[in-house]
Image (tube, rainbow, N blue to C red):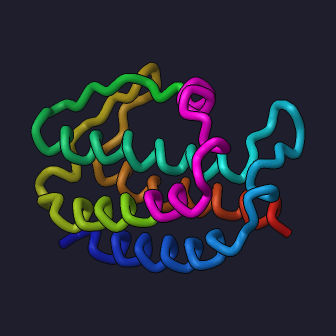
Amino acid sequence: MPHRHTANTLVATVDTAAAHLIQLDDATVRIRPAPEKWSIAEILGHLLDSAVNNHHRFIRAQQDDPLVFPRYEQDFWVEAQDFPGRPWGELVALWRLYNHHLAHVMRRVPADRLGVECRIGPYEPVTLGYLIEDYLTHLEHHLRQIEALAS
């Protein structure tokens, strides 16, 4: 399968991160470094939103050609869900397990669907293969942000 390596890296990255994240205390994860900046809980919530949105994209792009998907309004989604109001351990567990499922989905994408054109909101089209690779890049970027805030 073309994305087995990406899926395996995703699982390893998430498991390593979750082991560190679960050790953070509730007060630390709820602190906003500035009024316009997200807290650690909000960043992890954003990563959960990313998993949810990409899950839909990865499945629908196997069914629709081209895939047309609405823009993800990240600030609205994070605000509407009040991630700092959730128990931290539950949020970490949900994020970890959802990504395990997403890795399973990645492994099952047929090679002939990786080139499907995906249009997301007003952005230039990309392929499903690109979305799968970019998902991991995006996740790693935000995990570095969390690491910086936690230190």
As drawn, 147 above or below 30? below
Whether residue 44 sits left or right of residue 101 in the image: it is right
As drawn, 22 above or below 112? below
Whether residue 118 sits left or right of residue 151 in the image: it is left
The residue at 38%/49% (across/down) is 131
Relative image position of residue 13 (x, y in whole percent): 51, 74
Q: Nearer the viewer, residue 145 or 131?
A: 145
Relative image position of residue 110 (x, y in whole percent): 12, 59
Q: Which residues are magenta?
A: 74-95
Using the rendered view, name the quadrant where residue 18 is placed.
bottom right
The residue at 64%/69% (across/down) is 21
Whether residue 124 sits left or right of residue 56 in the image: it is right
Q: Nearer the viewer, residue 6 or 55?
A: 55
Asked if residue 11 lies in the magenta stretch, the reply is: no
Q: Magenta span: helix, strand or loop, mainly? A: helix
Q: Nearer the viewer, residue 123 or 47?
A: 47
Relative image position of residue 89 (x, y in whole percent): 57, 63
As drawn, 53 above or below 12? above
Extreme residue in the right direction: 34
* Marker count (numbered): 0
Which image quarter is the C terminus in? bottom right
The residue at 45%/54% (across/down) is 135
Which image quarter is the N terminus in? bottom left
As drawn, 49 above or below 121? below
The residue at 53%/55% (across/down) is 91
Asked if residue 84 lies in the magenta stretch, the reply is: yes
Relative image position of residue 36 (x, y in whole percent): 82, 31
